[in-house]
Image: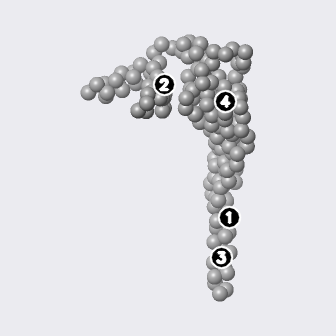
Amino acid sequence: MRNRFYLSIITFAFLLLFSGCSSRLVDFTIISTKNIDLSDTGYIREKTRSLGEDEIHIIIFIPMGKASIKEAIDRTIESVPGGVAIVDGVVTSSTWYIPYIYGKSKYVVEGTVLVDPQLVSAEPRDRYIIAKLDNDGEVIEHRTVTSDEFLVIKKKLIY
């Protein structure tokens, strides 16, 4: 009986020490860290949601920097060529830590990126966008590649 009690206490302490925490900080309609003219209605809304994060490592008990919500927002916006803002987004904070060994702390921003078509057309001409479509022709995923990467992908598709 006594051994069960101690085993229960040790198990509870182990689970408490080696657990992480994630919490939703804010939901937002529109957010940007860029200077944009909101009276312009020429923005295009992406069909897929994008994700950006900023994380730091915790070694022993010393954080190796400070996670930044602004940096996570910037990374989300910049993940899409011509991105200027995020709509219908969520900011989440996540932390886990094994005491005196290692841990991580991060902010994650997810949302739909607004694209300014003028900025996309201003990008260098040696950039290509590769898109994966579903059976209905809707864009599932896309990414920007250089002309060299495009040629490699094109050769793989032809042969």
Mark 3–mark 2 Cα distance, whole angstroms, equals 53 Å
Q: Is residue 146 above or below residue 20?
A: above
Q: How crowded is mark 3: few (under 14 residues within 10 Å), some or many (20 or more)?
A: few
Mark 4–mark 3 Cα distance, whole angstroms, equals 47 Å
Label 4 with label 3: CB-CB less than 8 Å: no
Quarter of the image where the N terminus is located: bottom right
* Mark 3 or mark 2: whose residue is earlier in sequence: 3
Q: Which mark is residue 87?
A: 4
- Nearest the viewer among 130 and 49 is 49
| Residue type of the residue flagged with mark 1 | Leu
Q: Position of residue 141 (x, y in %)?
A: 48, 32
SS for tag 2? strand
Q: Mark 2 points at which residue?
A: 144
Label 4 with label 1: CB-CB less than 8 Å: no
Q: In this view, does 74 lie above or below 151?
A: below
Q: Mark 1 points at which residue?
A: 16
Q: Which mark is residue 8?
A: 3
